[in-house]
Amino acid sequence: MIAHWGRILNYGPAIPLWPEQMQANWSKQFTTRYSIAGYSGNSFGWQQYMYCAGWEKLKVPAGEFTCLRYQNLINFQSDDANKVDCIRHEIIWFAPEIGRWVARESSGSYQIQGQIGAVLLENSTAWQLRSWK
């Protein structure tokens, strides 16, 4: 269950929030389906490719951390039948010493059914950890 986009998404089977192996060049593809809480009668396809780029020192408002930078490339079926070719790209800096991400960037795109070639961009978002403990 993730409340990342303002709605609660339930994945079955579940997908990991961070890499199974904390090492550079690790990668894995996940295929699952998701449903929206309160509308469990429908489920939608979700394909995710996770790739670990390597270790980096990163300074954010909460401090400086040694992080594993990994990326998710997600191709998913929207619950809006008019949206097709939905893609999300995430870059995440995960700090094992505190057990969570300290920075995250997310962007995406989609097309409207029947409109050839018109790619629409979703909002791009960047987060940084401000404090922890």
Image (cartoon, rainbow, N blue to C red):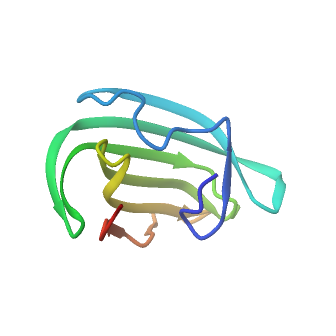
Q: How many marks can you see?
A: 0
Please report the residue visible at 76 percent of the width from the left and 60 percent of the height from the top: 37
Q: Is residue 126 above or below residue 25?
A: below
Please report the residue visible at 37 percent of the width from the left and 53 percent of the height from the top: 90
Tell me residue 127's x, y (percent): 34, 67
- In front of the other: 83 or 78: 78
Q: Is residue 16 left or right of residue 100?
A: right
Q: Is residue 86 left or right of residue 119?
A: right
Rendered image quadrant of residue 97: top left
Tell me residue 67's x, y (percent): 23, 45
> Which quadrant: the C terminus?
bottom left
Please report the residue visible at 56 percent of the width from the left and 38 percent of the height from the top: 15
Extreme residue in the front direction = 133
Q: Is residue 40 left or right of residue 61?
A: right
Please report the residue visible at 47 percent of the width from the left and 46 percent of the height from the top: 74
- In front of the other: 114 or 121: 121
Rendered image quadrant of residue 11: top right
Q: Is residue 90 above or below residue 31?
A: below
Tell me residue 91's x, y (percent): 32, 52
Tell me residue 95's x, y (percent): 29, 47
- In front of the other: 112 or 25: 25
Q: Is residue 42 above or below residue 115?
A: above
